[in-house]
Image (cartoon, rainbow, N blue to C red):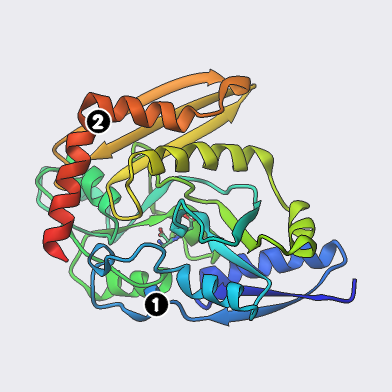
Amino acid sequence: MSKIIRIGTRDSELALWQATTVQQKLEALGYDTTLVPTKSMGDQVLDKPLYELGVTGIFTKTLDVALLKGDIDIAVHSMKDVPTQLPKGIVQAAVLERAITHDILVHKGSSFLESDQPATIATGSLRRKAQWLNKYPNHKVVDLRGNVNTRLLKLIENDWQGAIFAQAGLERIKLLPKDAVQLDWMIPAPAQGAMLVVAKQEDDFAKEALGNLNHPETELATTIEREFLRTLEGGCTAPIGALALIKDKMVYFEGVVFSLDGKQKIDIKKEVKLSDALGLGKTCAAEVLQKGGDKLMQEIRNENSTVH
Ligand SMILES: NCc1[nH]cc(CCC(=O)O)c1CC(=O)O
């Protein structure tokens, strides 16, 4: 195997951890590899909320272009950052076994959670904001951008009580504080905690190499969650959560869409046999749309377009 697989990645600590993990797995199988770190637009524009940038795939576009130009052979992504429609010519080549899916609150003392005192929580995610305000209507949520390391620093520098992160991200780069509070009531983003490796459609060598890294259960769960998101036409900027758990040949699915202020919530829970899991995300999304989700999604699109 003389060909060297060039692995494209963003250059944040978390992205590099993820890409190195893929690199080590490929090397263990006997493949030669090299890492190609790149800055994405999403990492460069830090002074605007994500949802105002109005571009889907802001973290993935730079790597897509590098892949299609032939500067890299594969790209490693946090799967939740990847738009549900991949660009033409790029395919999903491996979904790695998922880490913990939960969100987590990093704080400077958590007693405020048990009181009625007002508090300020930071997050750049509309999904986290809506769910937080739904549970704590008297709190304020402020925008927070940047990679995980930057966001932790901003929390220290600012007068906020806490900030919300994906537990998987903090664990991977060993920055999870011991007293962080796991938000097991918060529905994660579709595909949170999973890594996706993409390749060019025509690159059989890369696709075969990556086939060894694929984790079918994670692939199925994330497919269902992303189908739910795609059917709702949520992109990456709507307050939509989805989680599919696979256990004992059953799939347990939970999906939700919130209004931006967190006051309205339309959710769905379904359990089906593993053999009936095909199309589950779509069916659940159709039910949500029918239960008033279509109107809610339209409101979200209108409100989002007025802030652009
Ligand atoms: N949007 C940024 C992002 N993309 C993936 C992760 C964490 C790892 C994961 O969820 O797979 C994070 C950080 C966060 O949400 O705190």
Q: Quadrant of residue 237?
A: bottom left
Q: Which mark is residue 266?
A: 2
Q: Verify CB contact (< 8 Å) between mark 1 and mark 2.
A: no
Badge 1 marks a residue whose secondary structure is helix
Give 75 or 15, whichever is nearer the viewer. 75
- Residue at (59% x, 73% y) in the render: 68
Q: Is residue 123 above or below residue 19?
A: above
Q: Tell me how far mark 1 sits from mark 2, CA to CA.
A: 33 Å
Neighbor class of circle 2 (other Cα within 10 Å; few <14, some 14-19, many 20+) is: some
Which of the two discs, 1 and 2, labels the residue nearer the N terminus?
Answer: 1
Q: Amino acid at mark 1?
A: Met
Considering the image in quadrants, where does the C terminus appear? Answer: bottom left
Residue 93 x/y as whole percent: 67, 55
Give 231 or 166, whichever is nearer the viewer. 231
- Residue at (10% x, 43% y) in the render: 116
Considering the image in quadrants, where does the N terminus appear? Answer: bottom right
Q: Which mark is residue 41?
A: 1
Residue 296 x/y as whole percent: 18, 38
Residue 7 x/y as whole percent: 67, 73
